[in-house]
Amino acid sequence: MKTCDLPAYVIADLIKTKQVSAVEVLEDTLERICQVDGRTGQVDAPEASSEEDLSTVHAFTLVTEDYARQQAGKIDKLVKEGKNPGPLAGVPYTAKDIFTVKGIKTTAGSKILSNYTSPYSATVVERMADAGAVMVGKVNLDEFTYGSSSESSAYKPVPRNPWDTSRVTGGSSGGSAAAVAAGEGAISLGTDTGGSIRHPASFCGTVGLKPTYGRVSRYGLIAFGSSLDCPGPLARNVTDAALTLQAIAGQDSRDSTSATTPVPNYLKEMEKDIRGMRIGLSEEFFRVTYFDSESMELVENPIDPQIKDAVLSTAGFLAQLGADIVMDVPLPHTKYGVPTYFVISRVEASSNLLRYDGVKYGYRTAESFTDLRELYRKTRGEAFGVEPKLRMLMGIYLSAAQFDKGYYDLALKARALMRKDFEDIFDPRGKYHLDALLTPTAPSTAFSIGSVYGDSVMMAYSDQLTATTNHAGIPGLSFPVGFDNENLPIGAQVLGPDYSEGVLLRIARAYEKVTEKEDWRNKRPPILSKNGN
Amino acid sequence: MTDKISPEDFDRLTDLASLELPADEAEYLRKELNNQMISIEILESIPIDAEIGTAAHGIPYDELNSAAPREDISRQDPNREEILKQAPELEDGYIVVPDISYEELD
């Protein structure tokens, strides 16, 4: 097995004990990127069409070889000098191209930032460096994180799923999930506004952790929905997710919404047993409810039965370990998650997108213009893709006084109701007093590239099972629980009360341990064997 | 069914968003916005108790999880040149802004 396929905690240990150097691990990872990633995403480049394009991953928008070699060299020097290189010593990781990194291009997958080099680094990027991790590159995403398949990026080709390269990676942290699944970095930093860490994690068979809002600083994260955005890790196993959260969590004076709540020792919390824990299942999370524009009726569709079976089987394993499984937990406002998200996230996004103007930084139209307004209109019309345009226009429609029909106020009330649903089931003195809720992460496994993209409503409903978590601000952890009959990964998520990441990691770790002998645990993305790995 | 967002509304929105759009893209965007509005209308059916307030944030912030505001002190960024270098047009260390259009008020 190559070092790039090892867990992050093993890599760090091997480096600290001088059994392998950080530079060697980095070179293995760069070689893997060369073998499986294909063309790196470029703005306005052609979509995948050649046989090679269609069978490679395209996770990256930028491979930062020189930057990574410098970082890895520093780690090896620290080890040689007998100094502590940090808990993630020499671990190669990728960052979703929504995090600023000083001196490195930061594009948000958009033409409007295609020439932007950040003059500062995000707090999480600094904390990863402090922990000894080595950034091997920036990875692709839906433009400005707007989507659930990573197909809306201006950087083509868009990422493809390592388990089946005709399928999407999920999104919006699709490059992150694909890179982790394909061994192109042991960890990735992603962001989750309506499910954007957990959704691609489930599609690509990785672990993905959306922390409590404010648990991890948003400083240096290009904003989407400022009251919803949460940075967090994607990894191939629960321990690596815990290690990464440990490195990046905690208050930051540069983000006033970052919480001062003490950060527990997640590695210790994770290894405690789950006996006596109360874990709920809710019927509301086994169906998708939406308004059908053809029939003009509210339609309820069950999720893929293979996914439901996998989640129920997961509950069975947890029960074997001594957890109490509580059935029929009511979360009656789950069906309002996506409509509410359509309102709140759009209003916040439209405000955040007004700063891109072709004056201070970023793309500027090459056409002539007579005044500032014309410069704005041409620059923004040319350089934003359809997703940012849709979100801006909807955000303005929903918040401008001249169109106001009260939907924003209604959405904020719906948000309060979703929060109350979770408060009720996690209330220690309440009827259910759950420690966590176990649900499917997504209503389907990875769908085919091009099969949903273009229908913005259908795409949004891909997030129905994740969006309420963001409205409520609570943490959620997606982890692999098997495969469907097309050999595509299935993800389940555990949700818990504010700052309960330790509990969620504990449940996922217990499941990981009890299923380690299961056959499906030995499966690897076919793209790796095809390339002789 | 009548579209919630008419072509006239849409023109006003693109003006407010400062977007110049080709006709085919404008038509696609308006269609998608109206489809999204059908989904958003479901919010009108939520039984809302008069006591339910609005939540601009999911988790509450109080003295247990929030820091006091930091002091309001201005600091010179050490990367002034790097930041200015990102601007498409510069003159003597200033960002050049094209003429600002205005309307004469009666």
Image: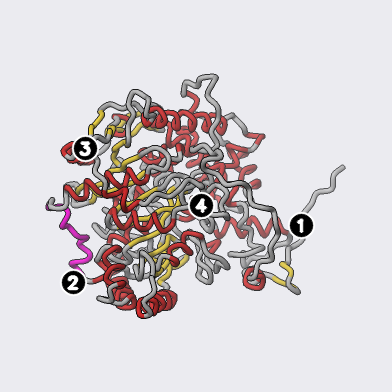
Q: Secondary structure at mark 3?
A: helix
Q: Chain of mark 1?
A: B
Residue beneath disc 4: A251
Give the x, y percent position of residue A320.
16, 38
Q: Nearer the viewer, mark 1 or mark 3?
A: 3
Q: Nearer the viewer, mark 4 or mark 3?
A: 4
Task: State which quadrant residue A444 falls in.
Answer: top left
Residue beneath disc 3: A315
Work out which quarter of the rendered image holds the C terminus of chain A and state it: bottom left
User: In this picture, which residue range is highlighted in magenta?
Assistant: A519-533
Badge 4 density bin: few <14, some 14–19, many ≥20, Cα 10 Å: many
Tell me whether marks 4 and 1 sit on the same chain: no
Q: Nearer the viewer, mark 3 or mark 2?
A: 3
The amino acid type found where label 2 is placed reads Gly
Q: CA distance from mark 1 to mark 3?
A: 62 Å
Q: Chain of mark 2?
A: A
Can I make out residue B41 in this image? no
The amino acid type found where label 1 is placed reads Ile
Give the x, y percent position of residue B8.
62, 39
Badge 1 density bin: few <14, some 14–19, many ≥20, Cα 10 Å: few
Residue beneath disc 1: B100
Which residue is more in the foreground, A84 or A160? A84
Task: State which quadrant residue A130 falls in.
Answer: bottom left
Q: CA distance from mark 4 to mark 1?
A: 42 Å
What residue do we see at 54% from left, 39% from top? B61
